[in-house]
Amino acid sequence: MESRRGVSNNQARSLYWLVAIYFQLSLLVESSQDRRLQQASRQRRLQPYTDSTNIVRHGPAVNSFQVSDGNWVDCVPIEQQIASHHPTLKDHIIQMSPSSYMDLQQNHVEAESWGLHSQLFAREHGGCPESCIPVQRRDPKQPILRKFEALQQQERIPHEYAATMQSSKGPYQGASAVLSVNRPQLGKPKLDYSISQLWLLDSEYNDMNTIEVGWQVGGWHDSGQQGSHSYPQLKKLPSPHLFVYWTADSYNTTGCYDLTCPGFVQINRKWVLGATLNISTRRKEQEISLVVAYDSAIPGWWLSISGTTIGYWPSSLYTALNSSATNIQWGGEVHPASNKATGMSSGAFLDKGYPLAAYQRCVKYADSSKTFFNATLEYLAPTNPNCYNISFQQGSFTSWGSYFYFGGPGCIKHT
């Protein structure tokens, strides 16, 4: 009897362990399925919002906030952002981060800490709800914001440049820099504008493809021109605005500023493209750090600002800039439309030195290995050296890497 009871106990224990193992395996399978379902639920697809007007725009705001600088920010569903209307982004799965091998943050150089009106929205309202992105409200009567020409086409419209470039041709898969942020004096704020930015460029059949990121003061706008260029939130004292821009056909029919047309896909719920950057009167120098890098696993160009990933330009937007860039440039651009002097960057000439003269430092490029290196800068002759100028250095200060001073007060035109 004892033997039979012993066998029975052993069988019971074996059965217990078999049942336990079965339940453990079931839980593992269920957990794996749950993870796959959760991952699938996180995959958001762009879905264009349409109404009876058939206007290409963002979906209706979930909620709206007024920021203390006077601007309004609308929180729109991430799936219904205006990028959803681009023909190549139909049912596009929104990428919420670059692929695992990319680390945009490691390429950032710490910039001077300073307040941004782009971040005022986050500080005052905590950002948009999850699954929404912030969009700076604009006057619907304002034309789509556009540029009109590339750096190589200066004869068409009187733009002035003081810029430098990476000395060798690409392919390049990234660019970065730390920009001083300034408030130059404009001749007429509603006509003139001044920009500090970095450009990534490529071309196919003479169609220039660009990505441009930086800050801009002022804006010009002529309702008689196709695609006028203006920031509707312009105040009495113009402040620098954070901006992104792209074009795939030399500024003719494609591309725009910020989120005013289908193109750039934003994923960040706190940063507001097109918002003003706060200039503190208590600091002599203020900066913003920019990184643009290509991710072949997405594929697309990712933007990170001061260590925060903002979003990306899908490769399908481009004809030439769809996997790499052949040229990278850094510097300033001015449109002095009036007959009054318009400053570039800080408005100071180079001999004023740090911190009065504007600069870009830690200027870098990424090659096909996606590794960032200090740029080897090549001189580009300023379009009007009596009004604006540029001078670059490489390795003079270890913490600055490759850098340059640029800008000037502009010139008075006599008409």
Image (cartoon, rainbow, N blue to C red):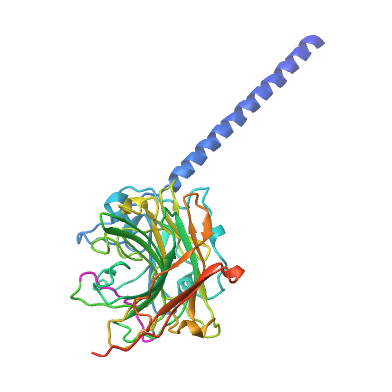
Which portion, as a residue range, is magenta?
Answer: 226-237
Q: Name the spot of residue 243 as percent of width and height, x first.
A: 39, 69
Q: In the drawing, does residue 173 fall left or right of residue 342? A: right
Residue furthest to the bottom in view is 414
Q: Which residue is drawn at 31% across and 86% down?
A: 188
- Report if residue 231 lies within the magenta region: yes
Quadrant for the C terminus in the image: bottom left
Q: Residue at x 48, y 39 (%)?
A: 36
- Image height of 97 relative to 287, above or below: above
Quadrant for the N terminus in the image: top right
Q: Name the spot of residue 75 as percent of width and height, x first.
A: 39, 64
Q: Is residue 249 visible?
A: yes
Q: Which quadrant would residue 184 be assigned to in this image? A: bottom left
Residue situated in front as seen by the camera: 347 or 257: 347
- Image height of 199 relative to 326, above or below: below
Q: Which quadrant would residue 250 be assigned to in this image? A: bottom left
Q: In the drawing, does residue 123 fall left or right of residue 152? A: right
- Report if residue 193 lies within the magenta region: no
Residue situated in front as seen by the camera: 207 or 310: 207
Residue furthest to the left in view is 224
Q: How many labels sit on residues?
A: 0
Residue situated in front as seen by the camera: 124 or 20: 124
Q: Which residue is drawn at 33% across and 87% down?
A: 187
Q: Name the spot of residue 338 as percent of width and height, x first.
A: 28, 85
- Image height of 265 relative to 390, above or below: above
Q: Name the spot of residue 168 as percent of width and height, x first.
A: 43, 58
Q: Is residue 332 visible?
A: no
Query: Mainly helix, strand or loop, the magenta region?
Result: loop
